Amino acid sequence: MSAEKRSSVDDSSAEPTENSEIKSDYNNSDDGTNEDNTFYHSGNCAFRNAFASCTGYTLENFTTYTNFTNWLHRPVDGAALGVFRMLYGLAMCIDIAEERGGGQMDLRFGEPQHCHFPLFNGISAVSFPVMGCIYLVMWLGAIGIMLGYRYRLSCLAYIIPYWYIFLLDKPAWNNHSYLFGLVGAILLFTDANRYCALDKYFQPSMPETVPYWNYFLIKFQFFILYMYAGLKKLTAEWLSGYAMSSLSQHWIFTPFRSLLSTDLTDLLIVHWFTAIFDFSIAFFMTWEATRLLVTPFMLSFHLINSRLFVIGMFPWVCLAEVPLFFGFSWPRRLSLKRVLKSCSSANKTAEHTRIASLNKASSQVCRKVDPCLVNRDTNCGNFKTYLGSKLQTALILLYCALQLFLPYSHFITQGYNNWTEGLYGYSWNMMVHTYDTVLTSIKLVDNGNGKIHYLNPYAFTEYDRWTKHADMAYQYAKCIEKNVRADYARNTKTSPLSSTNISLYFDIWCSMNGRFQQRVFDPRVDLLRANWSPFTRTAWSLPLLNDFNYMRPKLRTMTNEVLSWSNYSDVIFVADFPGLTLDNFISPDLTNVTLTILAGNVRYKSDDEDESYFLTAGKSFVLKSGETHHITTIGQKPSSYLYTFMNKTMIDNELLVDAYEDKQSRPLLPIWDEFTARIKNYKQFLKHMANCVLFLLYDVPIPMNLRERN
């Protein structure tokens, strides 16, 4: 058998993997290469072979722009991409009703005074009936993507409404919502409708191959997701184990808790292992030598996440992407297993030949003479690079560079930097920060008569992310002002305000990653007259008090000690800035309340006493329930202190709570309950869309649920 025939048989007998390269046929060298030339290039051969064995790629594909263009545009089987398209479309059909808010459409868009937080001020919410039609278009687009029907139009129908809804509300942002939008935009430019698609069914002449960059861009996007998620965790903040300090209590970690203590499970498994996994898994999945070994870890990781967190379709979209690393034609072989028995031998041979030809096309794009044995200037001539292909390559590289840069671009958009850098959603800060907010106060001052009013912080929104980000707090203050002015104009005589000349002050106390409770914004600044710019740091956004980071291990010890007193004891750690005063009312439900100063100097004053007290570190003071007191930090340094107390309500209701918990049966895997809840929510989503269409066509009244607003 000749060398040419042997090569043809080898190409047909095995399916190429996603990064397989055509092996050069040494016997085809016709330039009289001899032993001396082989020895001369042996050093380069060793490096190239090592690169190929580690990565699975041929080094020559990356040595020149032309070779790289050829590599990106080589035709490969589109079967695996078609399967990913179907799974992504299915996941998005579910996601629209859940994390896109389709099931709660009336609450988000049915209230005229509902506050939104757009990225750009020019974006605003349309009326509820029109918004229902926008959701309908997006839903039909997702179905079209799943079915591969009128593929480009379906992608546009899905992506445009998706990004409109995404950009309309920054508090709803998260990393995987950003990922879904990017993947949908990438699919718009691919030929993912060439397998298992209605377009392919109606147009059988459509090619079955796609350019390799269709796969490359999607895998690159997920590569960035994992690598940057790991990089953002390789910090002292995460590796110290404070971000997810109680996650190990979940039943998922029971096998680890049988070997390790709860604290060690939190530190070693939840924090250290996750950081290493996120950073390395993309590399291991790319390398052929390790791919099969780490795939079980990849699958288990996302299945565990689906039980640990309420993150919608994110684990399932990541699982749908995993098969893209295992070749291009595997779906065709899976489908063959189901029909081989019903096919004649002739049909079997024909189908095998067709798959073999696709596999050969996937690998034989640019058959090279081996560069280790011939002159390094040898060029590939089987794949002609056109100007359009080079331009596409430039655009692909530009997109990749943008994705590499954006997560670290916060030095430009400094207005979005608060305790964390940048807007949450495109930075891949996945589960890096956890917050505990104990107080949210909005003070409205009527400048006409000097009266003070306190507003329900969530009167105009159901989100709470505005409490941690200055840009959203600024937007919320402006929205509150607009609504107050509208209410005053509507009911001037019954309004509690004397005019619309008002001031708004936000006082929010929050803890990040187990630190002290502290203020997020300066409570002395009127946000209606404050300045904010996306490119300059916000002066009224208070910094994170890292002065007391050295106390964080001690806080855990003190917390465990107080909680051990009884089932109803608790503790709150507070830190404050010099010159600021904490006004605190002790609820009658709390007993045995004690104030202890940990650091700094404070002045204590109670409304029931004329005398004030100067307290220093180590001093304690017993507080009375039902009274308001004021603690002012004095001096040049911040102060820190703690409250310990007993919850009287929990004591009184102990029997009721125990009886209620006894009646509740909580399964470890409440899959059926989750399924029924999702079905109920999806029905509500479909009703919303139908009601909106009927209203626009026939003026049928829309039944809506509205939040109670005080």
Image (tube, rainbow, N blue to C red):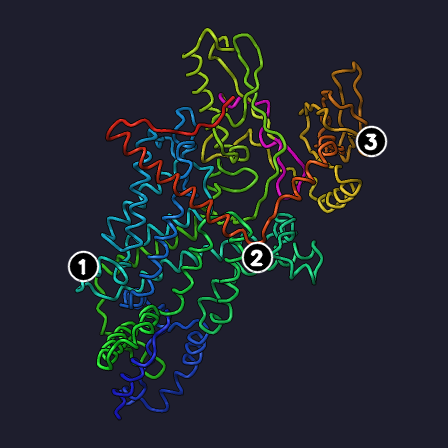
From the viewer's perspective, is 135 left or right of 303? left
Of mark 3 and mark 2, the one earlier in the sequence is 2
* Disc 1 residue type (three-letter): Phe
Residue mark closest to the camera, 1 vs 2: 1
In what element is the residue under mark 1? helix
Residue 567: where, in percent of width, then height?
75, 40
In what element is the residue under mark 3? loop
Please say if 376 is above or below 650. Answer: below
Residue 207: where, in percent of width, then height?
21, 65
- Judging by the rendered image, the residue that carries numbered circle 3 is 619
Of mark 1 and mark 3, the one earlier in the sequence is 1
In what element is the residue under mark 2? helix
At x 51%, y 33%, the residue is: 466
* Disc 2 residue type (three-letter): Ala
From the viewer's perspective, is 586 left or right of 204? right
Dividing the picture into quarters, in which one does residue 106 lie?
A: top left
* Residue bounds of the magenta highlight: 509-528
In three-dimensional space, the C-alpha distance between marks 1 and 3, rounded to whole angstroms, equals 81 Å
Q: How many residues crowd mark 2 within 10 Å: few (<14), some (14–19), many (20+)?
A: many
From the viewer's perspective, is 390 left or right of 420? left
- Judging by the rendered image, the residue that carries numbered circle 1 is 202
At x 21%, y 63%, the residue is: 386
Q: How many residues crowd mark 3 within 10 Å: few (<14), some (14–19), many (20+)?
A: few
At x 54%, y 53%, the residue is: 307
Q: How many residues crowd mark 1 within 10 Å: few (<14), some (14–19), many (20+)?
A: few
* Disc 3 residue type (three-letter): Lys
In three-dimensional space, the C-alpha distance between marks 3 and 2, rounded to whole angstroms, equals 41 Å
Of mark 1 and mark 2, the one earlier in the sequence is 1
Dividing the picture into quarters, in which one does residue 348 lie?
A: bottom left
- Judging by the rendered image, the residue that carries numbered circle 2 is 275
At x 52%, y 11%, the residue is: 496
